[in-house]
Amino acid sequence: MTGRVAELVSPDEAALIGVARALIDGGALPAARSTVPAMISPACARLLGDALAQAWPALWRRGGGTAPAIGHDGARGRVWERHPPTGLAFSAVSFELVRWLAGGGGGGTRVPGAATLGDHVVVYLALATTRGAAIHARLADHPVVRGAPLAWLGFADSLARAGGGAPPTTGFDDLCTGAGAIVVESIAGELAARWRAAELGKRAIRDPHALIALGAAQHRVLDAWLAACDRHARRDLAGFVIDAAQPLL
């Protein structure tokens, strides 16, 4: 953490900012702290907002959105060239998730209200950032994570292994219109890579019950996703499924 940040906020608040920046940059989370603040100063809130404001570039870098492409409406260019500027709103849900991560996933989990699309983006980035870390499995069992359709779209294998219940069947429509559709377009390349890796990973599963549970979760997610895409005439948003399967075939 830079000296400037250390001058503006307390060490515990600096840990929150470190987590937010790690989610955006894709780096390792800072060491877990034994105490995390329940309330933060205006300076900390401003710095957290500054970090999360970079969520769009973070998605573009992860999912191949920086490459020129042709959109479903014929528009050409990179994601930000094909779509007008669209803001993401972050609520107390994002703050609570950042607090939970800063504390190493210890203690209880609080869900302060309904999650926004911006909150679901934070969930997605958190799952991507913690992949391979011990906290990833606990994160996959977090109630906010399990209720986020975007999380299931990107990490159905992780959430199925956590075993905290079936995927949702609603909420996918929000990812087929407006900013939600732009999010999916932005990370389509990464979604394809994740689904392909999940299929290859099945070769190492020896427990038939675990294999069946994973397949059932994937089937439920794709059924809900394809139905939502059809309702909004956006089958192109499901193209990552074909991209995932092509190398396997």
Image (cartoon, rainbow, N blue to C red):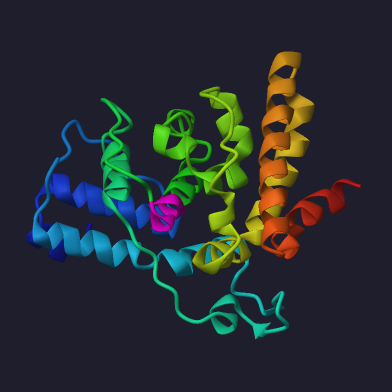
Residue in front for this viewpoint, 36 or 38: 38
Q: Is residue 4 magenta?
A: no
Position in image of residue 148 (x %, y %): 49, 43
Residue range highlighted in magenta: 116-122
Residue 207, visible in the rendered structure: no
Q: Is residue 248 left or right of residue 230?
A: right
Position in image of residue 94 (x %, y %): 32, 49
Residue 8, visible in the rendered structure: yes
- As drawn, 17 above or below 78: above
Q: Is residue 118 magenta?
A: yes
Q: Is residue 135 left or right of residue 172?
A: left
Q: Is residue 246 left or right of residue 204?
A: right
User: At x 46% / y 68%, what residue is drawn?
Assistant: 56
Q: What main secondary structure does the magenta stretch of the protein show?
A: helix
Residue in front for this viewpoint, 21 or 171: 171
User: At x 56% / y 60%, what residue is drawn?
Assistant: 62
Q: Is residue 136 left or right of residue 93?
A: right
User: Splitting the image into 4 quarters, where does residue 31 fall?
Assistant: top left
Position in image of residue 151 (x %, y %): 53, 44
User: At x 14% / y 40%, what residue is drawn?
Assistant: 38
User: Splitting the image into 4 quarters, where does residue 159 fall?
Assistant: top right
Q: Residue furthest right?
A: 249
- As drawn, 111 above or below 230: above
Position in image of residue 231 (x %, y %): 69, 57
User: Splitting the image into 4 quarters, where does residue 32 fall?
Assistant: top left
For the N terminus, the image quarter is bottom left
- As drawn, 141 above or below 209: below
Residue in front for this viewpoint, 188 or 103: 188
